[in-house]
Image (cartoon, grey):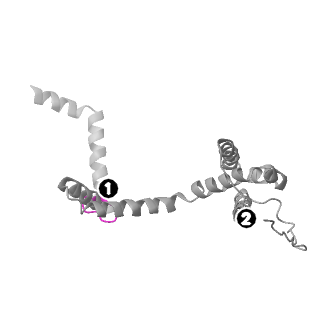
Amino acid sequence: MAIALVPEFGIEIPDDVSYMDLRARAEAAYNTIKALEEHGLEVDIGDSDRDVAATLLTSYAKDVESTSKAVSTPRVNSMTPASLVETHNILQEFGQLIAVHAAEIRNTVTNKLILETENPDARIRIKALELLGKMTDVGLFTDRKEITVTHQTADELREKLREKLLVLKQNSQGVYEEAEEAEED
């Protein structure tokens, strides 16, 4: 089955865009490949395709701009569809924000622990309940430390400072050393 391609002419490329980001280019290539798969293109990702994608994305992780500039249209045209699909897949899998994944993991763990509270084994139920109680949002089993701050007036602080200075002055003169010797006898 043949696909009729109709080019669109007259689309202007802005002057301020010097390169296309690899993410956008990989997304466009992936969408094109998916459209071609609907018309019979078969994409089998092999080890060499994974190596090409890994090398490309390692370079992209080190320097986004220069790698995006280096991955030009002719370079993308020389890559296999499987390499482009794998590049897109890796960007989708590992290019997300960690915070988003952390929230998803937190929700998954919480839901699994809730399910484990219905386990017939009492040890598993108790451990699941304990872990749920230790979650920061619940805070049932968290250790809390109280810190008491006593505020003192300036006069009280001056008096304490004078007392400490007097002790230091007396100690430097040996007054306390003689008192300690008398206590030992």
Q: Which residue is mark 2?
A: 39
Q: Nearer the viewer, mark 1 or mark 2?
A: 2
Picture coordinates of residue 114 (x, y %)? 30, 64
Give the spatial CA distance, label 1 vs label 2.
Answer: 88 Å
Where's the N terminus, which quadrant?
bottom right
Name the one closer to the observer, 120 or 71: 120
Q: Earlier in the sequence, mark 1 or mark 2?
A: 2
Label 1: which secondary element: helix
Name the one closer to the observer, 19 or 38: 38
Q: Which residues are magenta?
A: 134-141
Left or right, residue 105 beside residue 56:
left
Q: Is residue 26 above or below residue 162?
A: below
User: What residue occupies the far top of the structure in this picture?
Assistant: 185
Label 2: which secondary element: loop
Left or right, residue 173 beside residue 7:
left
How many marks overall?
Answer: 2
Left or right, residue 6 beside residue 181:
right
Residue 148 can be seen, yes or no = no
User: What residue occupies the far left of the structure in this picture?
Assistant: 185
Residue at the (21%, 57%) spot, across then down: 126
Q: Is residue 167 above or below residue 76?
A: above
Q: Looking at numbered disc 1 in the image, what kind of residue is underneath it?
A: Arg
Q: Looking at numbered disc 2 in the image, what kind of residue is underneath it?
A: His
Residue at the (31%, 50%) spot, across then down: 161
Q: Is most of the magenta stretch helix, strand or loop?
A: loop
